[in-house]
Image (cartoon, rainbow, N blue to C red):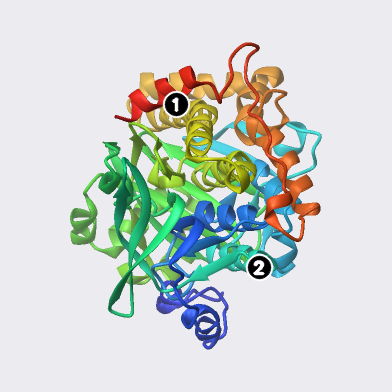
Amino acid sequence: MSSVPAAFFDSPDNVPPDADERQAMSHAHAPVPERTDVLVAGAGPAGMLLGLLLAGQGLDVVVLDSSATSHRTFRGESISPDSVRVLRSVGVLDHVADDRRRTVSGIRIVDAGHDVLGVDFASLSACGELPHEIPQDVLLEAAAERGSAFPGFHLIRPATAVGVIREGGRVTGLRVERDGAETIVRARVVVAADGRYGTLAADAGIAIRRRPAARDFLWFKITPPADWDATSYQVRIDDDAHAMCIPTVPDLLRLGINIPSGGLRAIRKEGIGAFHDRVAALVPELADPVREQVRSWRDTSMLEIFTSAADRWWLPGFVAVGDAAHTLSPVLAQGVNHAILDAVVLADQLGPVLVASGDVEVDTRLCKFADLREPRVAAARALQLRQEFAFAQSGPVRTLARRGVYRTLDAVAPLRAHIWGRLYYSMDLPDDPAAAALDRLTHRMGNQPSHPSSIPVEKSVANPGDSWESADRWAKIDRSAS
C-alpha cells in the first residue's frame, strides 16, 4: 500500500515543484494601487470570491493576499451544495480540473460500532448538486483565474494589511505592507476577510467574542484500503471520542481525531503508538494504514477548535466577512460555505450602489448585508453546537440516549430532510437571501457593461413604508455605529 510522505503537508497536493513559483510570479510585480472601489484584506474563499463578484459587475477591486501563493496547510476542503451551486453559476468550477475535485453522496454516523444515521444528499434536494471536496489552494487559484477575466480584479501578493485608516468617522483605507515598504490604499469600502486569527475587525473597533471548544482536532491524510467507502462522509463515535473521515483528492482520506483542548503536548508525550491505538479504537478498519502511513507527528496537523462572533459586522466604510466575522466549528463543514454565501450577499448589496450612490447608501447596504446574513450564520452555529454537545456525551445512559436520537432521525425521513436539507440546501428555501442575490449577480455579470457607470442602481427591498434610503433609517444606523 502506498503511503503519504512526511513532506505531504509542506507542499501542495500533487502540484509540480515550480507551480507555486508560477503562481507567485503572476502577481509579484503587480503595483499596489493608491485607490480602489473595494479593498479586500484576505484572499481566502470569502475574499477571493467577493473580489471576482464585484469585479464582474464592473467595479475596481483590490484583494490582498499576505502569502505568495494560495497554498495553506489543512484549510477547509469541503464545499457544501449551496456553495457548489454558487461556484458553478459564476464560472469558478470551470477552472477546476476533474481530477482535483470529487463529490460526496452521503453521511454515515456510526456510534459504538452501530450504524445509527445515514443521509443521502440526493434525497434532500432536486437541484442535483452534491458536496464537493476541493483542495483549497485549487479552489482559490480557480477563483483567481475566473477573476482575472475582469479588468477591475487586482490580486496583490504578498501584501499585508497592517492597520485601518479613518477619516471623518469612517474607515477609508488600509495601511499595506509589501516588500518591507508601507503604503496607504484608499477605498470606498474596506473588507476584513483575514480569517479566524484576523486583526482588522478589532483594529477597526469591532469586538470579537470567542468561545473555545472542549476539544481540538488532529488531522492527517492517508491512502485508505481499497474496500473503504469513499463516497460518504463518515463520523465514528465511541463514548466521547470521535473521528471525522472525509474523502479527498486524488484518492485519499482526511481524518480528524478529537483531543482535549490544549492537550496536544500531552498526546505527543504518550507517543505516536498511543495515537495509533486511539484511531484504531474508533475506526478499526483503518488501523493498519494509519500505523503504516502516519509515522510521526510531522504527518499530522492540529486545528484549534473555537467559535467566534463579531458583536457587529460593519462600521461606516468597513465590513467583516467569513471567519473574520464568524468562526464556525469544523463539525458539518460549514465554514467555507458561509464564507462563500457572505461574499454572494455582500457583492449583491454593494455592486450597484458603489457605482452611483453616496456613502450613506453604501453604509445602508453594509447594514442590510449583516441583517440578512447574521441569522443564517447563527442558525448554522446553533446546529453545530448541538452536534458538538452530542459528540461530547459519555457514559452508558447518555450515549444510549444519543444513539436513540440519531436512530429517530434516521427513521423519520421528513424530520431528517428538514434538519439536513436546511443546512446543506438552504438556497432551496423560498426566502433565502443568497439564492436571490445569486440570481441578480449572474444576470449582472452576464450583461456586464463596458463602463461601470451604466449599471443601474437597485433600490433595497424593504417592507412597505420603510425606505432604506430614508433619513430616519440612516439616523438609526448612525447611532448604532457611534
Give left or right: position of 426 versus 290: right
Give left or right: position of 269 versus 355: left
Q: Which residue is mark 2?
A: 151
User: Which class describes the residues within 10 Å of circle 2: few (<14), some (14-19), or many (20+)?
Assistant: few
Q: Nearer the viewer, residue 316 or 84?
A: 316
Q: Which residue is mark 1?
A: 382
Label 2's element? Answer: loop
Label 1's element? Answer: helix
Q: Residue at x 35, y 55 (%)?
A: 277
Q: Residue at x 31, y 40 (%)?
A: 169
User: In the displayed image of the protein, which residue is found farthest to the top?
Assistant: 465
How many marks overall?
Answer: 2
- Quadrant that contains the N terminus: bottom right
Kind of residue at disc 1? Ala
Q: Is residue 260 above or below residue 148?
A: above
- Quadrant that contains the C terminus: top left
